[in-house]
Image (cartoon, rainbow, N blue to C red):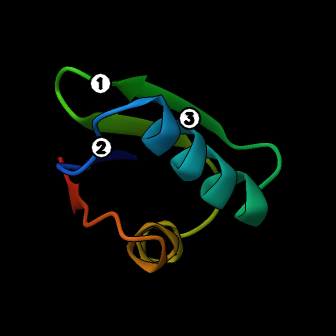
């Protein structure tokens, strides 16, 4: 799944997002495109679960 994360701007954001996703799925792989403010997530977890986790830590997001 690919998500736009407009508020993502720095390494701290990247770490926070990674930690939130890995807390749900320790085998998830997250690829970051900081310039485009997008992430690609490889996981078996449902989309809404991932989006809810990102929203919970303050990162609005939308499917790309």
Position in image of residue 30 (x %, y %): 56, 34
Q: Nearer the viewer, residue 60 or 25?
A: 60
Q: Badge 2 local density, few (<14 within 10 Å), some, or many (20+)? A: many
Closer to the camera, 30 or 13?
13
Q: Label 3: state its secondary structure.
A: strand
Which mark is drawn over residue 30? 3
Residue tagged 1: 34
Helix, strand or loop at mark 1: loop
Image point 68% across, 51% down: which residue? 19
Circle nearer the viewer, 3 or 1: 1
Cα distance in 3D space between marks 2 and 1: 7 Å
Measured Cα–Cα span from mark 2 to mark 3: 14 Å
Quadrant hosting residue 29: top right
**Image-quadrant location for residue 9:** top left
Residue underneath mark 2: 8
Label 2 close to label 3 by CB (< 8 Å) = no
């Amino acid at each position: 799944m690919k998500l736009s994360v407009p508020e993502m701007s720095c390494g701290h954001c990247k770490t926070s997002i990674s930690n939130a996703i890995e807390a749900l799925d320790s085998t998830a792989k997250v690829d970051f495109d900081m310039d485009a403010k997008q992430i690609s997530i490889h996981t078996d977890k449902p989309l809404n679960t991932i989006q809810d986790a990102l929203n919970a830590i303050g990162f609005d997001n939308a499917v790309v």
